[in-house]
Image (tube, rainbow, N blue to C red):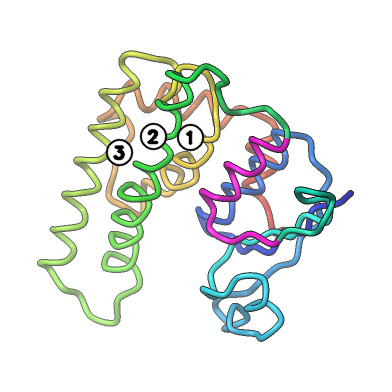
């Protein structure tokens, strides 16, 4: 059965389209244009009560009943568990994948999002905010680079943790980041960017 994906062309939205492509799951795309306030439409709020994309509806949810989900990290975990793919089965490796997924959800995404806002979209330039979030972004890239000096992917094998991180790193230029400053991270970035499923997922919605 076809999963319904409600999304827009943001890093969080692209996490889910990449995962769906990697997993080979059938899905249909419902663009939610957040620049026009479509995320506040009553029908969408029934699926995503926090008025954020992405969200999915799986007509073949647990128990054979439809399941609506919002929050990109929760969706990634659900899809991995549904298919038994992109998440380690070993308890130690699974814990490592979960910690890096939570690192992205709690730090790498929110802090880079603030850098995007104050560097590109704020109605006035606020030097303190620009410096604060740009510096924190650079620190987080350093954390990731150090991890990737030890392993090909953040949790050993390619997983939803890498999928969660990649679309945010794909906007490194928005954040004032030169990937050449982080060689291990750049090697990881180039390897993921070359994956056909990633390339396709990064174009959703078209």
Neighbor class of circle 2 (other Cα within 10 Å; few <14, some 14-19, many 20+) is many
Mark 2 to mark 3 CA distance (whole Å): 22 Å
Secondary structure found at label 1:
helix
Between 119 and 100, the residue placed more toward the observer is: 100
**Which quadrant would the C terminus be assigned to in this image?**
bottom right
Instruction: Please check the rendered image and state whether residue 157 is part of the magenta-colored stretch, yes or no.
Output: no
Vertical arrangement, residue 77 with respect to residue 54, above or below = above
204 left or right of 115 in image: right
Vertical arrangement, residue 12 with respect to residue 161, above or below = below
Mark 3 to mark 1 CA distance (whole Å): 22 Å
Identify the mark at residue 178; answer none if there is no mark.
3
16 left or right of 119 in image: right
- The residue identified by callout 2 is 100
Residues tagged 2 and 3 counted as in contact (Cβ below 8 A): no
Residue at 49% across / 27% down in the picture?
190
11 left or right of 22 in image: left
Residues tagged 1 and 2 counted as in contact (Cβ below 8 A): yes
The mark lying in front, picked from 3 and 1, is: 1
Mark 1 to mark 2 CA distance (whole Å): 6 Å
Secondary structure found at label 2:
helix
The mark lying in front, picked from 2 and 3, is: 2
Quarter occupied by residue 153? top left
- The residue identified by callout 1 is 161
Residue at 58% across / 41% down in the picture?
77
**Segment colored magenta:** 68-82
Residue at 16% across / 66% down in the picture?
129
172 left or right of 7 in image: left
Between 68 and 196, the residue placed more toward the observer is: 68
């Amino acid at each position: 059965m076809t999963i319904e994906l409600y999304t827009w062309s943001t890093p969080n939205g692209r996490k889910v389209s990449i995962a769906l492509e990697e997993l080979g799951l059938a899905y249909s795309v419902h663009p939610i244009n957040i620049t026009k306030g479509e995320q506040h439409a009553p029908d969408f709020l029934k699926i995503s009560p926090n008025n954020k994309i992405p969200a999915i509806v799986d007509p073949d949810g647990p128990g054979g009943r439809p399941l609506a989900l919002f929050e990109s990290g929760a969706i990634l975990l659900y899809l991995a568990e549904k298919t038994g793919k992109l998440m380690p089965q070993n308890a130690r490796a699974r814990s490592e994948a979960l910690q890096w997924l939570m690192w992205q959800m709690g730090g790498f995404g929110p802090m880079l999002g603030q850098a995007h806002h104050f560097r590109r979209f704020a109605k006035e330039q606020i030097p303190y905010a620009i410096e604060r979030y740009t510096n924190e972004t650079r620190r987080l890239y350093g954390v990731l680079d150090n991890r990737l000096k030890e392993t090909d992917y953040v949790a050993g094998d390619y997983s939803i943790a890498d999928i969660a991180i990649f679309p945010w790193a794909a906007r490194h230029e928005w954040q004032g980041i030169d990937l050449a400053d982080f060689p291990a991270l750049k090697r990881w970035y180039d390897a993921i960017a070359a994956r056909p499923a990633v390339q396709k997922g990064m174009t959703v919605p078209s």
